[in-house]
Image (spheres, helix red, strand yellow):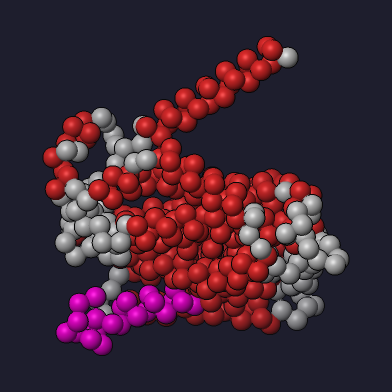
Amino acid sequence: MWAASCLASCCAACACNACTTVVSGISRRSARIAYCGLFALSLMVSWILREVAAPLMEQLPWINHFHKTPDREWFETDAVLRVSLGNFLFFTILAVMMVGVKKQKDPRDSLHHGGWMAKVVCWCLLVIFMFFLPNEIVSFYESMSKFGSGLFLLVQVVLLLDFVHGWNDKWVGYNEQFWYAALFAVSFVCYVGTFAFSGLLFHWFTASGQDCGLNTFFIVMTLIFAFVFAIVALHPAVNGSILPASVISLYCMYLCYSGLASEPREYECNGLHRHSKAVSTSALTVGLLTTVLSVVYSAVRAGSSTTLLSPPSSPRAGADKPLLPLDNKSSEHEEKDKAKPVTYSYSFFHIIFSLASMYSAMLLTGWSTSVGESGKLVDVGWPSVWVRILTGWATAGLYIWSLAAPILFPDREF
């Protein structure tokens, strides 16, 4: 017994020292990556509690106060929402605290980049506290999460448009034959991928002998968008480029696939999963990992955006600055940099994570607390279908607007 106690104490001390070493090694440049790591941790906690916390939550009287105990899926959904709420409050509090930070000499700049042990402890306490809240607060948060998720998807679309236009401008700016050829090659591959993808969608989601008019409409509309993108981009009045049009076409087709794949498994037109009512743990893990990478990329991209986050007094965010330091020499110049303006809006950066917390909760709960048509599947159900399809249409509209706006309003800067 004494030996076991000593061993446990040693393990705890080693774990504490390891955590202290990790958080003390986080520098200014790697702070954004650390926030992404904390967010990814919240998704893993949500996933784990979604699988194992239901039996315990059934025993909590302030959660299970119903005359008839709900199904297990209700408790799984509730666990995800409570972790998401704690994550949302954590990043929202940071966003409020960082309002108005313009110079690196502001004391709050150090709070944004440092104090990681305290941040992790506060995050843990917030998540634990969420499990003592009444169900009415969690239900209200679930309703608000649907709107927050829509805002996050809109931010994703804007970041994608900013990325593809910047990518095109950079390659065209080289003004060399090689880069023009590379631009054409990438555009060609994207268009081939778009039309090949559409063929697979027709094969998977328009089953013969079934009334699959809705799926056919979704796919045909996406193909029409692809043709419209090319026509508008190559119009002499627009003088655009085929590269952004091809990338946006492929992305819209992916969103169409993502929406169709989220249709209920028993739906006769969902040929991709028509022969299986359940999904293996490995398939669910891959789906969750894809979600994590997508959300983390959006947050990192938002933190590096030159158009969305830079305050008026700051230099262009992310210009020639890696997210992670390549060596230790940068620390020597940190004191000299104290008087410099911040390179991106810390407050908006944390808002991105707040919205992403809502979005991830909707993904893990199928956009609704009602279960039955989706069971334990991640991101499956008609609400998810329409969210993805509408996001694709919004992407198409914003891209066409980005081409047409400079012509319609020549006196304004876009």
Q: Residue furthest right?
A: 68
* Residue visible at 37% across and 79% down in the picture: 400
* Residue visible at 50% across and 69% down in the picture: 148
Q: Quadrant of residue 241?
A: bottom left
Residue 328 vertical position relative to residue 315 in the rendered view, above or below:
above
Q: Of 313 and 252, which appears nearest the observer? A: 313
Q: Is residue 24 magenta?
A: no
On screen, residue 216 versus residue 277, left or right, reads left
On screen, residue 98 versus residue 339, left or right, reads right
- The image quadrant where one finds the N terminus is top right
> x, y percentage for residue 114?
34, 41
Residue 15 vertical position relative to residue 53 in the rendered view, above or below:
above
> x, y percentage for residue 28?
29, 41
* Residue visible at 75% across and 62% down in the picture: 74
> x, y percentage for residue 263?
69, 69
Residue 246 makes an appearance in the image: no
Q: Which residues are magenta?
A: 393-414
On screen, residue 14 versus residue 278, left or right, reads left
Q: Is residue 401 magenta?
A: yes
Q: Residue furthest bottom?
A: 408
Q: Main secondary structure of the magenta part?
A: helix
> x, y percentage for residue 240?
28, 74
* Residue visible at 68% across and 11% down in the picture: 3
- The image quadrant where one finds the C terminus is bottom left
Q: Of 272 and 295, which appears nearest the observer? A: 295
Q: Of 108 and 150, which appears nearest the observer? A: 108
Q: Quadrant of residue 202?
A: bottom right
